Image: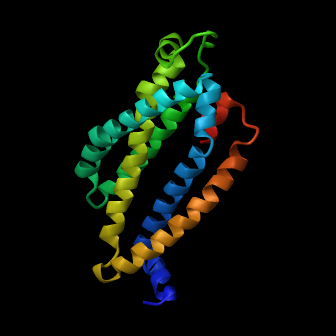
Amino acid sequence: MKRQDTTSVLTASRAVAATAGARLAVAFAMRAAMVTRQVYELERWDLSRSDYASFGLFKSITGIAASWGLAGPLSRRFCQGCGTEHLVKGAAAVAVVAALAEAAPWPRSPTGVEGIAAKALADPSLLVYACVIFPLKTAAGQVATIALRARFTEVVPASDTAGALAALDVASSAIGVAAPIVGGFAFDGVPVPRQPLVA
């Protein structure tokens, strides 16, 4: 199949183009927002490297649990036809609410507290971020990704699936290059407590 034919599959119908565009937009937003996430977490909660290693492990486990316990069941239940659109809109609404909660003014954390567990217990914003906001944002991102992936396979004709997936992969690779650059510029100069609003 020629390259022109492969890429034209993504614009062959309005449904395919809309779904591919939504998938690429979600991927772009997620990758751009993740560019400064580690620096944000280190600075916002004054985490040491060892604190961040423990926090990273906790986030990985929590992310897997959120994906398995929330994203999977929601996607299986609602990823049928028009349910996908509502699921993606719901996931976006959850992500916005989580970002607003994360950016809300919290009492200043005490300084001099050592250890990630002690910091989380001393600082309500870290505790809420770790136990509520991060899992919700992770699940929302997973739900949107799974729903759009399922919708994409529904709207692409079976004979064009390989070409459409190849074209989508090329576009996703381009996003992987462009999103960090845009994300870096978008977060440059934004005060740490307000970065969730940009994300």
Q: Residue furthest bottom?
A: 2
Residue 110, position as x, y percentages in the image: 61, 9
Residue 44 x, y percent position in the rendering: 63, 25
Residue drawn at x 65%, y 49% as measured from the top left:
183
Along the horizontal axis of the image, is 161 left or right of 23? left
| 13 w.r.t. 111: above or below | below
Who's the residue at 40% across and 71% down the image?
15
9 relative position to 177: left or right: left
- 77 left or right, relative to 58: left
Is residue 136 shown above or below 19? above
Q: Of residues 132 and 80, which is closer to you in this image?
A: 132
Residue situated in front as seen by the camera: 47 or 82: 47
Q: Is residue 32 above or below residue 170?
A: above
Residue placed furthest toward the right: 189
Q: Where is residue 165? Give x, y as percent.
A: 40, 73
Residue at point 53% right, 66% down? 173
| Rendered residue at 36%/51% (across/down) | 86
For the C terminus, the quadrant is top right
Q: Quadrant of residue 105?
A: top right
**Quarter of the figure that contains the N terminus:** bottom left
Q: Position of residue 38 (x, y in %)?
A: 58, 37
Name the colour scheme: rainbow
Left of 184 or right of it: where is 96?
left
Task: Give the tally of numbered discs.
Answer: 0
